[in-house]
Image (tube, grey):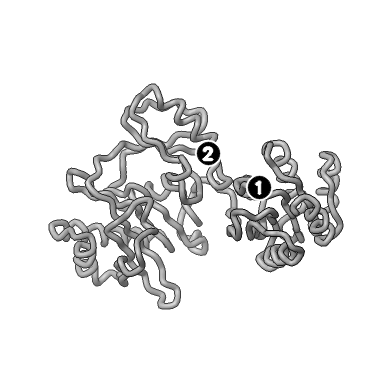
Amino acid sequence: MKLLEFEAKQILAGAHIAVPVSTVIRKGDHPSLQTPLVLKSQVPTGGRGKAGGIKVVEQESDIDSTINNLFQLSIKGFTPAVILAEEKLNIKNEYYLSLLIDKPTAEIRLVANKNGGVEVEDNGPATFLNTEIHKNNFEAVGQQLADQFDLQSQAFALQDLVEKLYTCFVSNDATLLEINPLILTTDNEFVAGDCKMELDDNAAFRHNWNFEEKPAEVNFVTLDENGTVATIANGAGLAMATVDAVAERGMSPANFLDIGGGANTETVLAAFKRIVEYPYVKAIVINIFAGITRCDEVAKAIIAAEKQITSLPPLFIRLSGTNFDEAKILLDGADIPLLGTLEDCLQAAKQVAL
């Protein structure tokens, strides 16, 4: 289970780990806020900063318009139901710190880098501290972290932080706890500037979890940003076969997209919104063999996409399986044609893609 940032920070605060003072804003709320502040879109995906989903607001007159814009901003197919408003921190430095489970060894590992923030992926693998952490080595790991961050004067504070993070990780059955950036303020305090947290669904019976409902995520991989044919399928095998079929017929597939089992209208619509970010796509091939995923849910998403996305390329649709008849009625009513086979879709797509 992937948490939104504000949910993860609520857990951190409960574990006595410092987070910025914040307010959660939902549509229709009119909270009293003071500037300067940071407004953050709460969507279940990365890259929010580069996509414009995090805004620093210096003037009170800009608060309402910035909130409204963030609520309307789609990031990788997701639009927020919640905005997080936080105090603007006085930052001295930014670091990267995470705890995760190494499945082959069944160890909890601490990973850290002295250069955190949005460009953390630019750091080479050799520059990261990667060490096992357990309840008997907090002092040693805290010292390693002080060495990694070149903060010998903060060794005791880092030891305390390591212990609190480990306890938070274990007690909440987390599989990932990533703080990026871990901020050192000008007052020499460590604050979790951002947090990504994933919890083990199998441990839900031990907790009283009540988190924000999120759309299911899809398995989306860019193959060619200049590709002319996008694909949507369900199941990794069918998605891969669909991509291969597009390529075998001389077309350039832009993406691999597996909407998985149990996808709903919102999930599939989010997939369409990601596809239209590709500038050269001329056709979308949809190949669904429905089981847990229902054809009528896919049909509803297709109809919604046709209404909401003005730049939607032509669709070539093959559906089969659960609730096919209901889907056909919906699509017929919207004058959206179905094709009988994947081969029919590919032949029709070639007419516009080549």
At horizontal 41% and vertical 75% (from top left) the residue drawn is 106
Q: Residue furthest top?
A: 61
Horizontal side of residue 54 vs 79, given as left or right: left
Q: Secondary structure at mark 2?
A: loop
Horizontal side of residue 271 vs 175, given as left or right: right
Horizontal side of residue 267 vs 200, given as left or right: right
Eyeballing the image, is 43 above or below 149?
Answer: above
Q: Nearer the viewer, residue 39 or 84?
A: 39
Residue bearing mark 1: 272
Q: Residue furthest left?
A: 153
Q: Position of residue 105 (x, y in %)?
A: 41, 77
Disc 1 marks which amino acid?
A: Phe
Q: Residue furthest bottom?
A: 105
Q: CA distance from mark 1 to mark 2?
A: 19 Å
Q: Residues within 10 Å of mark 2 (few under 14, many from 20)?
A: some
Q: Nearer the viewer, residue 205 or 96?
A: 96
Eyeballing the image, is 317 above or below 82?
Answer: below
At horizontal 17% and vertical 44% (from top left) the residue drawn is 187
Whichever of callouts 1 and 2 sits on the residue coming sooner in the sequence is 2
Q: Nearer the viewer, residue 89 or 3?
A: 89
Which numbered dot is residue 81?
2
Camera sees residue 17: no
Camera sees residue 179: yes
Q: Position of residue 295 (x, y in %)?
A: 77, 53
Disc 2 marks which amino acid?
A: Ala
Q: Quadrant of the C terminus?
A: bottom right
